[in-house]
């Protein structure tokens, strides 16, 4: 039977090799229990690439540089991209009611934020909305919000910045009206120029150091849940290295990084202050 037949799964040995390869490239751990799911996801790539079976596709990927478009297609299949604007109310309440007011009591006039593993940019535009709305005199500030993701397709979508009603459902009405434009009466929304001016996106793998000057605030959410202890540790070292002393990390509450936060003070289960 052929690998393109939906009842055929990767063998246990193939499962081990695919899982090892995914882990080495992206840090993501795929459990053996996900055999059917992984087989289905690879099958989609077989169709796209015209490659006959799981074994040939494995050998094909193994020889390709990670920058190759097929690697991106494969990673898009095996990673979760679920995201939406204003996800996790407590984060935005803190940003608007505590972080931004406190920031404006200092003599700073610049703000650098990193939305790490940003998927299609929803988190970065949520940050931009809060910042645009929360700074008393926005034009006197230099604001830079960088969104990064391993997925080239995700980064392209973030740059395109078109959000449907589902992605926009938690954006407060007044902010939606003031900072987004509805496209031609369609159920698609686009951030206004002032949000776009603050945001930029690029591809980056969290297992690699980010070559950027340090940030005042980092969002790292709903990604390390798929990593194991070693890859989490590697990511946290990379993240800590680009955070200013006194900066904040907004993490997913289930990220499982509690043991790796020696350099931070825990403010909430999802909020850390870099010492
Ligand atoms: C579930 S989304 C999270 C999006 C957003 N942070 C949120 O919480 O709504 C997870 C994202 O992590 C990205 N990702 C997975 N492994 C990564 C890695 N090693 N480096 C960078 N991004 C990665 C995926 O491509 C995906 O877009």
Image (spheres, rainbow, N blue to C red):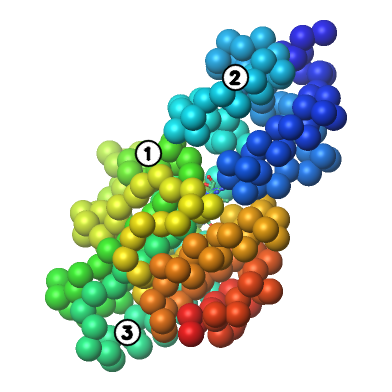
| x 83%, y 40%: residue | 33
Q: Which residue is mark 3?
A: 103
User: Going from the N terminus, do you reach mark 3 or mark 2 first?
Assistant: 2
- Identify the residue shown where x is 50% and y is 34%: 66
Q: Residues within 10 Å of mark 3 (few under 14, many from 20)?
A: some
Residue at the disc numbered 2? 60
Residue 46 place in picture, x, y as percent = 63, 17
Residue at label 1?
156
Quadrant, the N terminus: top right
Q: At numbered mark 2, what does the secondary structure look like: helix, strand or loop? A: helix
Q: Is mark 2 within 8 Å of ligand 1?
A: no
Left-right relation of 245 to 108? right
Which numbered disc flags the more N-terminal residue, 1 or 3? 3
Q: How many marks?
A: 3
User: Which label sits in the foreground, 3 or 2?
Assistant: 2
Q: Is residue 147 visible?
A: yes
Residue drawn at 22 percent across, 88 percent down = 107
Disc 1 to disc 3, C-alpha distance? 31 Å
The local crowd at label 1, few if under 14, some if 14 to 19, many if 20 or more residues have their Cα within 10 Å, is: some
Q: Residue at x 45, y 68 (%)?
A: 241
Q: Position of residue 240 (x, y in %)?
A: 49, 70
Comparing marks 1 and 2, which lies closer to the viewer? 2
| Image coordinates for residue 47, horizontal then vertical, percent | 60, 15
């Amino acid at each position: 039977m052929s690998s393109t037949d939906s009842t055929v799964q990767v063998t246990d040995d193939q499962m081990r090799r695919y899982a090892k390869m995914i882990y080495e490239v992206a840090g993501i751990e795929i459990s053996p229990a996900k055999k059917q799911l992984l087989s289905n996801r690879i099958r989609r790539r077989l169709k796209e690439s015209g490659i006959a079976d799981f074994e040939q596709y494995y050998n094909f990927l193994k020889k390709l540089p990670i920058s190759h478009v097929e690697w991106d297609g494969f990673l898009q299949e095996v990673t979760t991209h679920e995201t939406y604007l204003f996800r996790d109310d407590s984060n935005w309440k803190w940003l608007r009611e505590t972080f931004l007011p406190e920031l404006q009591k200092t003599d700073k006039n610049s703000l650098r934020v990193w939305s790490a593993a940003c998927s299609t940019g929803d988190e970065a535009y949520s940050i931009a909305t809060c910042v645009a709305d929360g700074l008393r005199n926005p034009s006197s500030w230099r604001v830079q919000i960088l969104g990064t993701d391993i997925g080239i397709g995700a980064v392209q979508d973030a740059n395109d910045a078109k959000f449907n009603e589902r992605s926009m459902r938690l954006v407060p009405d007044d902010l939606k009206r003031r900072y987004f434009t509805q496209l031609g009466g369609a159920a698609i929304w686009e951030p206004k120029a002032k949000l776009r001016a603050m945001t930029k996106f690029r591809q980056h793998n969290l297992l690699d150091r980010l070559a950027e000057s340090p940030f005042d605030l980092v969002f790292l959410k709903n990604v390390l849940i798929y990593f194991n202890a070693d890859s989490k540790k590697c990511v946290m070292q990379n993240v800590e290295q680009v955070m200013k002393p006194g900066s904040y990390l907004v993490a997913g509450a289930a990220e499982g990084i509690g043991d790796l936060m020696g350099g931070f003070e825990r403010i909430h289960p999802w909020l850390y202050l870099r010492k």
